[in-house]
Image (spheres, helix red, strand yellow):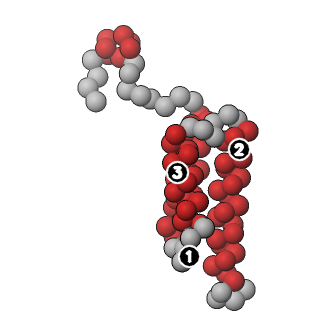
Amino acid sequence: MTAVTAPLAVQAELRGRLDAYKAKAARLGAAEDPLLVERYDAARRMLWSAPCDLRVAEQAVLRYQRAVAEVLSGPRDTGDAGDAGDAGGQQW
């Protein structure tokens, strides 16, 4: 690979990873989650802009991947635990 094609290959790999995680989220019914939409859009804008800072774009893809894993692992803690949370006496 040359100095020109290596960054393009990395950019293509990141684009592919981002789209694969979006497809996974869509397949499992989570593609419209507001957090996922925001993180996907941010990463996509970085990866389809020129010039592309690959380090920053890679971090954006990783944030999206983590968000997908979080959303798919179960409901996010909204801090509203109802009566059970009141009995525990925890302060946030």
Q: Which of these two is toward me, 14 or 45? A: 45
Whether residue 70 is visible, yes or no, is yes
The picture quadrant where one finds residue 19 is bottom right
- List x then y, in percent, for residue 79: 37, 26
- What's under tag 3, amino acid-wise? Arg
Q: Which residue is mark 1?
A: 50
Q: CA distance from mark 3 to mark 1?
A: 19 Å
Mark 1 belongs to which amino acid? Ala
Q: Is residue 23 left or right of residue 59?
A: right
Mark 3: give few (<14), some (14-19) or many (20+) Cα within 10 Å: some
Quarter of the image for the C terminus: give it: top left
- Give the mark, 2 or 1, whose residue is nearer the N terminus: 2
Residue 75: x %, y % from top left: 53, 28
**Residue 34: where, in percent of width, then height?**
52, 40
Q: Residues within 10 Å of mark 1 (few under 14, many from 20)?
A: few
Q: Secondary structure at mark 3?
A: helix
Q: Which residue is mark 2?
A: 24
**CA separation in Å, label 2 and label 1:** 27 Å
Q: Amino acid at mark 2?
A: Lys
Is residue 46 found left or right of 5 in the rendered image? left
Q: Measured along the vertical axis of the image, is residue 74 above or below residue 34?
A: above
Mark 2 closeness class: few <14, some 14–19, many ≥20 residues within 10 Å: some
Identify the mark at residue 23; answer none if there is no mark. none
Residue marked by disc 3: 39
Q: Position of residue 2 (x, y in %)?
A: 69, 89
Q: Nearer the viewer, mark 2 or mark 1?
A: 1
